[in-house]
Image: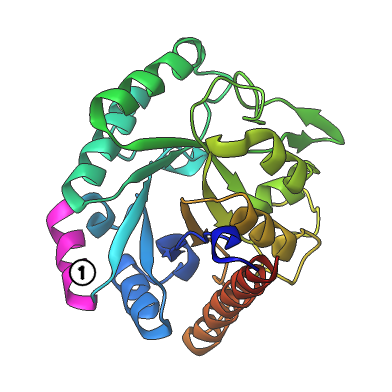
Amino acid sequence: MEADDAVTIPDIPVALSTASVYPENCAAAFQHAARLGYDGVEVMVWTDPVTQEAGALRALSELHGIRIVSIHAPTLLISQRIFGVDPWGKIDRSLELAHEVGAETVVLHPPFRWQKEYARDFADGIATREHDSGITLAVENMYPWRVGGREVEAYLPHWDPVSQAYDHVTLDLSHTATAGSDALAMIAALGPRLRHLHLADGLGSMKDEHLIPGRGSQPCAEVLDALVHNGFDGSIVVEVSTRRLSVEQRELALAEALAFCRLHLAAALDEGAER
């Protein structure tokens, strides 16, 4: 291969979501991330007061030498009262928090179906806030809810962000499993709009499983390969469920997830260098 033909590979940070250590707290997530060699942390804004306080988060970041790559806004059904009940207020406070801790991205979910007024101006509202703040607002793919054997559309305008007018998107591989979506097709369709990946796995259950990558049916390795060869320059965040594990088992699971990610990113690097 001639030098001019060499493939430029982006330096993709691999971060740990604080949600991945639940029921341990945010401080424990920073400890796990530093000990295992993660590049950063995504802070899920939660009932843990540390996740809502910029000073405390900066102190943890400095103590462990771990940067905060992203803030996950409290837009889940079970976090509807965190940062108030006004949906735009939640986004604005999440943006303020991201600015104060140096995070480049805020992850958020699409509006619920009953949030009609919020949903009507959602695409324009996030575009304006992204422009004004300089922080990426990446809307996450979700999935249809299933009740009594039928699907219920719980999100407006839709749970799938591919066809929506969002400038930036987060792809969650547990959610693609639950929805029955084709993750690789979504990556191809999103192109440069894909700015953030929640690395997990799933078996297609109606439950949002967030398995360790490689333990489900999602093409996790192929997704990582596609990101490298598409020139992805966002962040990869390991967002898995370890709530039923002991602390020792949790650390092993998080180490496994990181090793899976590093291994397949390295394989994609090697393949690209040989082209």
Q: Residue at x 37, y 71 (%)?
A: 29
Front-most of residues 160 and 2: 2
Left or right: 114 in relation to 25: right
Front-most of residues 151 and 267: 267
Left or right: 87 in relation to 57: right
Question: Toward which corner of the image does residue 107 lie, by quadrant?
Answer: top left
In the structure shown, which secondary structural element does the residue marked by tag 1 occupy? Answer: helix
Q: Residue at x 60, y 45 (%)?
A: 171
The answer to whether any part of residue 128 appears in the image is: yes
Amino acid at pointer 1: Leu
* Magenta span dominant secondary structure: helix
Q: Is residue 6 magenta?
A: no
The answer to whether any part of residue 86 appears in the image is: no
Question: Toward which corner of the image does residue 187 lie, by quadrant?
Answer: top right
**Residue 212 pos. (x, y %):** 65, 70
Question: Toward which corner of the image does residue 224 lie, by quadrant?
Answer: bottom right
* Residue matched to label 1: 60
Q: Residue at x 34, y 79 (%)?
A: 34
Q: Residue furthest bottom?
A: 248
**Residue 167 pos. (x, y %):** 49, 27
Span of residues in magenta: 54-64
**Which image quadrant: the N terminus?**
bottom right
**Which image quadrant: the C terminus?**
bottom right
**Residue 204 pos. (x, y %):** 81, 53
Work out whether 195 lies above or below 51.
Answer: above
Q: Residue at x 63, y 35 (%)?
A: 190
Front-most of residues 177 and 268: 268
Left or right: 231 in relation to 25: right
Neighbour class for label 1 at 10 Å: few (<14), some, many (≥20)? many
Q: Is residue 58 magenta?
A: yes
Q: Residue furthest right?
A: 149
Work out whether 115 lies above or below 79.
Answer: above
